[in-house]
Amino acid sequence: MAVHRTKASQRTSPDLEKLVADAISLAASGSQIEDRFWEERLNTRLMRLLKSQNQNAIDAALDQTFRINTIAFEVLADSAETLAESLVMEHEGKSWDVLLLALPIVAHTRYQIPSGPLSVSAIESTALALQGAIASTDARLAIIPWLYSIDQMPHSHCQTRLLTEALATAAITEGEIKIELRDMTETIAVLADPRFIIAVLAAPSGMPLFRWQAEPPTRIERGMSLIGWKTAMQDTVASLLPGCEFDLLLPESYFTNCRLADKQVRPLSMRAAANFLESTLGVLPAGLSCVVGAFGEEQADEYRISFSLKGSSEIVYGVIWPLYDRETVTNDALNDLSEDESPIKKICDALHEAGVEDIFRHAMLFDPELCDDCGAPLFPDRSGEAVHAELPDDAPTQQPLFH
């Protein structure tokens, strides 16, 4: 959802070529008046594709711009996300601005992170917290009665647009949310993962959506809104996630918060893995060794981190550190620690903070292999092989899968 990487080339079409050309033209624009011209052209084409549920064309355009013009890619990606997560709706002669929100909870545990239906009381307390700390006084809201894992979220711009429209109608009319929550994808058990409550805010067009947009005395700065949100939601989230440590992020736009939550959970995955192996195998983090390798078909899409006991070549656990659009790593810098913001530097820092000191970094790009039998990701060992991560035979049998 939040990750975009180039795929195999697809046959071009006139619509695809025009979409790419408009994105390149907007990226090259030198004035706001020209910006508006190209934005209108680009948004019109994108809306046509969203309404026809033609996600393949949007993905193909993103792939092409990603390869040939990174600035145009950013422009196109931002435009597609904006149209998917926001809209203007007319109701009873009045215009409403609508924004889809993700309310992230970044959690880690030694057990399992719950997901699933939200109780009426949880929905009511979430609505009160939103109204008290986040939403403007004129805003209406609708909240989906489900605590989402990332694999249950909408995975395309077209799906997200449909969800935004359904929630917008419910919020503005103050009616029932008409979406299907049965047959949800099964949640994969991992030690550190975000959970999300999805909501929509709607306000009369031109009026503030958020408290920090309002004029005094109702204005609340973002930092104070976050404090108020965390305080108001503490007991509710604690009851939703028993046995978990968690942090709440500021409710914001859907795509931005999905990426932010995914990024914030990555270092937690290292600490959760070290804690899990300590409680399961009785080995302190200082007694662990890690091997880090980049995986992808043509460029790094993710890093995979293998955990083993010091002095042993057997991989007992693995963690995946996904990369996002603004984190592209060249193949000659896969294990370069000289750049503070490089993924490999952040990975090593997170491992050190978790107490792991013995870290081996591969400079090669691995194929993103999965186990043929069970579909689990394979992880690098020191010799450069991608292998299955397996706990010792005498370890407890009911364990979470790999993050």
Image: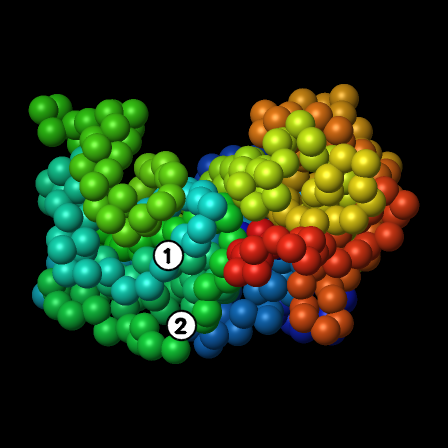
Picture residue at 80% right of the left edge, 42% below the top: 312
> In the displayed structure, does residue 401 sit left or right of residue 86?
right
In the image, is residue 210 above or below residue 187?
above
N-terminal of the pair, mark 2 or mark 1, is 1
Circle 1: residue type: Pro
> Looking at the image, do the residues carrying marks 2 and 1 touch, with CB atoms under 8 Å apart?
no
Quadrant location of residue 133?
top left
How many marks the image carries: the answer is: 2
Residue 272, percent from left and from top: 53, 40
Residue 26 shows up from this direction: no
Residue 4, percent from left and from top: 62, 54
Q: Which residue is mark 2?
A: 184
Picture residue at 86% right of the left edge, 52% below the top: 385
Residue 242 shows up from this direction: yes
Quadrant location of residue 165?
bottom left
- CA gap between label 2 and label 1 equals 14 Å
Q: Which residue is mark 1?
A: 114
Please state which of residues 72 and 168 is positioned toward the viewer in this rendering.
168
In the image, is residue 399 above or below residue 281?
below
Query: Tag 1's secondary structure?
Result: loop
